[in-house]
Amino acid sequence: MLQSPEVGPLGVGLSAYSGDPVGIFGRINRWASTPTRQGIVTAVAFLGLSVALLLASGCAVGGEDRPASEKPRATPTRRLDRPGTEACNTFARWLASDEDPATRQAVAIKVDKQASTSKSGQIAAKAEILAKSTVIASNENWALAADAFAYECQHLGWTAADAR
């Protein structure tokens, strides 16, 4: 069979099929020519074409054809609402006072209660973490939770001028 040392780009001898008059493509065509196999080949081709069309049209990704203003936001709103402002104000007043660790629990519970109805960013979630007993009991955990809550307030536009 191998009559020539020529090698193709894939490392296969070019003359490997020279003794076979049908060749590799002829074998594939002969295999695919039976009625059952024709149906399989057609189904695979149709499925591949369908997937390609879905990917090309963007339907598989979903929602990419909507303008940015109509896309759902990661958070309900990026501005402070009234409950969020009240919670931030209460927390800021406590911070401006002596930050007594004995009053942490009372402030955390009050801030959590005020923020629980807020739809602003992650204020409610940060206040809930602030009110956990394991956070209140640990100085390190309290510092992290307090910083996260204060950051969320500032990130949503709260300023010290808002505290009344």
Image (cartoon, helix red, strand yellow):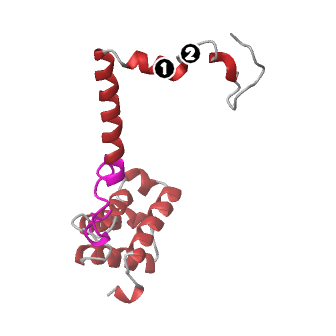
Q: Position of residue 56 (x, y in %)?
A: 36, 52
Along the line of sight, the residue nearer the viewer: 110 or 67: 67
Is residue 72 one of those drawn in magenta? yes
Mark 2: few/some/many CA within 10 Å (<14, 14-19, 20+): few
Type of amino acid at the residue the image marks with label 2: Pro
Question: Do tag 1 and tag 2 residues touch (Cβ < 8 Å)?
Answer: yes
Q: Give the secondary structure at mark 1.
A: helix
Q: Position of residue 4 (x, y in %)?
A: 76, 18
- First to last magenta residue range: 54-76
Residue position for label 2: 21
Left/right of residue 145 with respect to residue 77 in the rendered view:
right
For label 1, the residue is 26
Task: Single out the residue that lies furthest toward the right.
Answer: 5
Q: Is residue 102 left or right of residue 125?
A: right
| Residue occupying the point 29% across, 28% down | 43
The amino acid pointed to by label 1 is Gly
